Amino acid sequence: MKKIALFGTGYVGLTTAACLAEMGYSVVGYDVNEAKIDQLRQGQIPFSEPELAPLVERNISAGRLAFTADCGDALNDAEMVFICVGTPTSPSGAADLSQVEAAVRLIARSATRSLIVVLKSTIPPGGSAEHFAEILTGELLPPLVAHIVVNPEFLREGSAVHDFFFPDRVVVGAWDRPAGEQVAALYSPLHCPVLLTDPATAQLTKYASNAFLAAKISFINEVGRIAEKVGANVYAVAQGMGLDERIGGDFLEAGLGYGGSCFPKDVKALAAIAERHGSPSALLRAVMEVNAGQRRLAAEKLHDALGGLGGKNVCVLGLAFKPDTDDVREAPALDVISMLCDRGATVRTYDPVAASRAQEVLPPHSRLHYCEDAYEAAKGSDAVFIATDWKQFRDLDWNRMGSLMKGKTILDSRGLISPLQMQEMGFRCLALSS
Ligand code: UGA
C-alpha cells in the first residue's frame, strides 16, 4: 500500500487526505498545530464540510488514515509528500509563500529517503516551484533526491468530497516525467482526463481557471446592471447564454458576487503576477472592481428602498460566503453588514452554521445582533436582505416572516426566492439587478 504524507490539515489537506485514504492509500496527515491533531485523531473536523466527517472516521477506523504533529513520523516510509498549506494574500496582493517554504525546508531536513514532493497549495508560476526545487536539492542529505510535482486542487468548499471523486480533470506538472506519471497514477481509479505538463503550466492552469470563473461571475453581474437599465431579466439572460455550450450555464448566477478563500486571493495574485512581469491585466482589475461594486450596490439598494438607513432595522440572512459551509473568509455578507451598521442601520442576522466564525472576524457593534433563527432575525425589521443562497431560506414560512417584520421589503441578492410568489404574499421583492 503506497504511503502518502500530507503537510497541512486545512480544508484542502484534510479533504485530500481522507479521500486518498478512501481510495486505499495509507495516509498520514501532519500539522504543526498539536491541538488540531488531537481533535482529528478523535475524528473531530474543525470546519463544516458535508460528507467529510464520516469519511475521516471510517478511514481512521480502517487504519488507512492517521494524524501526527511529528514530522519524522509523517515522513517515515512516505513515497510522496503533499504540501497543502495556505498561500494567503500578502500586503502587495501576491501570494504569501512562507508556509510552503517552511514545509519544503522541514521536509528537506527530515527526509530519510528519496521522495516526490507534491505541491497542492496554489503557488504562482514564474520562479516559485524552481525556488522550492533548489531548497530541496540544497538541503537534502546526499544521495537523497526529491522531485517537485505540481498538482493543483479544484475542490469547491461545500462539495469538496464530491469534487475529489468526480473531477473534470486532474492536472499534473513535473520536470521529471516519471515522477509526474507516478502522481497521475494515483488518480487513475477516478477515470478522468489527466493533463501531464510542466510545473509552470500546471500552476497557471489553476490561477487561470479560478480567474476565469470569477470573470464569468463579474461579467453576469455587469450584465445585470445593464439589464436593470433596459428592462431585461438577468436570470433569463443567463439562462439564454448558458444554453450555448460554448458559454455554459455554470457560474452565471448574478448576485452579490464571489467571496471565499480562493477567488478573491487568486484573482488578486494573478493580477500581481501579470503586473510583476510587466503585463498588467486590465481585465482582472475590472473583475475585482465589479465584484466589490456588487457589495456597495446592495447597501445602496437597501438605502434607497428604505428611504435611508439611519434608524432602520435590516434582517440579514446568511453570513457564509456560499451555502453548505461555515467559511466567512471574504464573505460578501460581512462587508454589507459593516456598511449597513456604519450608515446607522440595526442589523439582526442569522446563518445556519457560520455565525460564530463571523463573530470572530466582524468587529462587535452595538447595533449588530446574531440571532438563533431566521424568524428571530426578522422580528421588527424594515427589510430582509438575503446574502447567502442557503436552501433553507427558500423554504422558510414567509407568511410568518412577514407577520414578524415591520416593513415588507425583501432584497434577494442571490435570486433564491420567487418574486411573484413573494408579491402575492404582499412583499415588495427587490433584486440586485432585475
Ligand atoms: C473555488 C473553485 O470553484 C474551485 O474549483 C477551486 O478549487 C477553489 O475555489 C480553490 O481554489 O480552492 P470555492 O471558492 O470553494 O471554489 O467556491 P465556488 O463554488 O467556486 O464559489 C466561489 C464564490 O463565487 C462564492 O462566493 C459563490 O457564491 C460565488 N458565485 C459562484 C457566484 O456569485 N455566482 C456563481 O454563478 C457561482
Image (cartoon, helix red, strand yellow):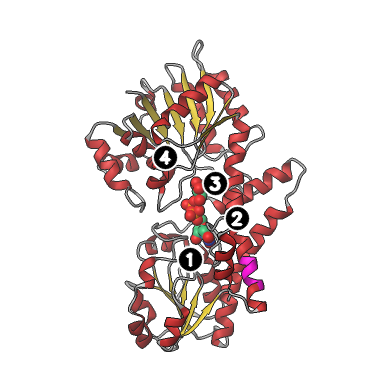
Alpha carbon separation for disc pair 1 and 2: 41 Å
Q: Is residue 224 magenta?
A: yes
Q: Position of residue 422 (x, y in %)?
A: 43, 82
Q: Residue at x 42, y 29 (%)?
A: 186
Q: Quadrant of residue 226?
A: bottom right
The label shown at residue 88 is 3
Alpha carbon separation for disc pair 4 and 3: 15 Å
The kind of residue on which mark 1 rests is: Pro
The kind of residue on which mark 4 rests is: Gly
Q: Residues within 10 Å of mark 4 (few under 14, many from 20)?
A: many
Would you say 349 lies left or right of 206 here? Answer: left
Residue range in magenta is 221-226
For the N terminus, the quadrant is top left
The kind of residue on which mark 3 rests is: Pro
Label 2: which secondary element:
loop
Between 319 and 97, which is closer to the camera in this rendering? 319
Q: Residue at x 46, y 59 (%)?
A: 328
Between 393 and 29, which is closer to the camera in this rendering? 393
Q: Is residue 124 magenta?
A: no
The label shown at residue 363 is 1
**Label 1 vs 4, first from the N-terminus:** 4
Q: Nearer the viewer, mark 1 or mark 4?
A: 4
Label 4: which secondary element:
helix
Prevailing SS of the magenta stretch: helix
**Label 1 vs 2, first from the N-terminus:** 2
